Image (tube, helix red, strand yellow):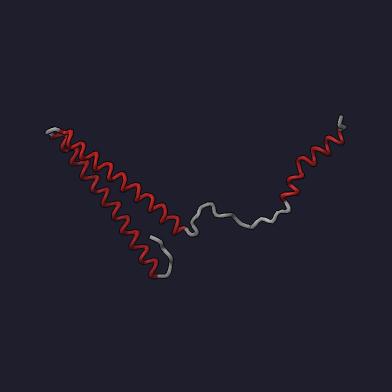
């Protein structure tokens, strides 16, 4: 049976031995980068690419849904008006997404002219 001194020594070594082992490992100073992009510009462009791609999928889905609304209206003027309104707003949304892509291309072109890297 262990005495109080032996158990205290065992507890001390058990608790602090890993600290002394890991304290000798050289670690780089500073915070590591948790994302794979090196600059904020690359990160924002990647987010914009994802948003544009998802937006295109949503536009296609709602174009099909607006067409389905036209087919199921069966001459009902209220339903046809609702389908027309949906189609107009889907086209507006598509132009907004296209505009975002064009603005992004213009900004990247300007950044390249001043010497900053920008990937499209």
Q: Quadrant of the C terminus?
A: bottom left
Tell me the quarter of the picture where residue 27 sits: bottom right
Residue 105: % across, % down: 34, 61
Residue 85: % across, % down: 20, 41
Q: From the viewer's perspective, is residue 76 above or below residue 61?
A: above
Q: Nearer the viewer, residue 53 or 8?
A: 53
Q: Quadrant of the N terminus?
A: top right
Tell me the quarter of the picture where residue 66 sits: top left
Residue 13: % across, % down: 80, 42
Tell me the quarter of the picture where residue 30 sits: bottom right
**Residue at image location 31% in from the left, 48% down from the top:** 56
**Residue at image location 36% in from the left, 66% down from the top:** 110
Q: Nearer the viewer, residue 107 or 21?
A: 21
**Residue at image location 38% in from the left, 50% down from the top:** 50
Residue 12: % across, % down: 80, 40
Determine whether, in the image, residue 75 is placed left or right of residue 110: left
Q: How many marks?
A: 0
Determine whether, in the image, residue 98 is placed left or right of residue 25: left
**Residue at image location 21% in from the left, 43% down from the top:** 87
Determine whether, in the image, residue 27 is placed left or right of residue 96: right
Determine whether, in the image, residue 115 is placed left or right of residue 11: left
The residue most toward the bottom is 114
């Amino acid at each position: 049976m262990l005495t109080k001194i032996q158990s205290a020594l065992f507890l001390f070594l058990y608790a602090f031995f890993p600290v002394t082992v890991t304290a000798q490992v050289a670690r780089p100073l500073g915070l590591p980068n948790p994302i794979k992009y090196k600059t904020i510009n690359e990160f924002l462009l990647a987010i914009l690419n994802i948003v544009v791609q998802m937006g295109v999928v949503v536009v296609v889905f709602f174009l099909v849904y607006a067409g389905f609304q036209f087919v199921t209206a069966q001459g009902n003027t209220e339903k046809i008006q609702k389908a027309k309104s949906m189609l107009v707003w889907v086209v507006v949304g598509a132009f907004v997404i296209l505009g975002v892509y064009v603005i992004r291309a213009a900004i990247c072109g300007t950044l390249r002219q001043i010497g900053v890297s920008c990937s499209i």
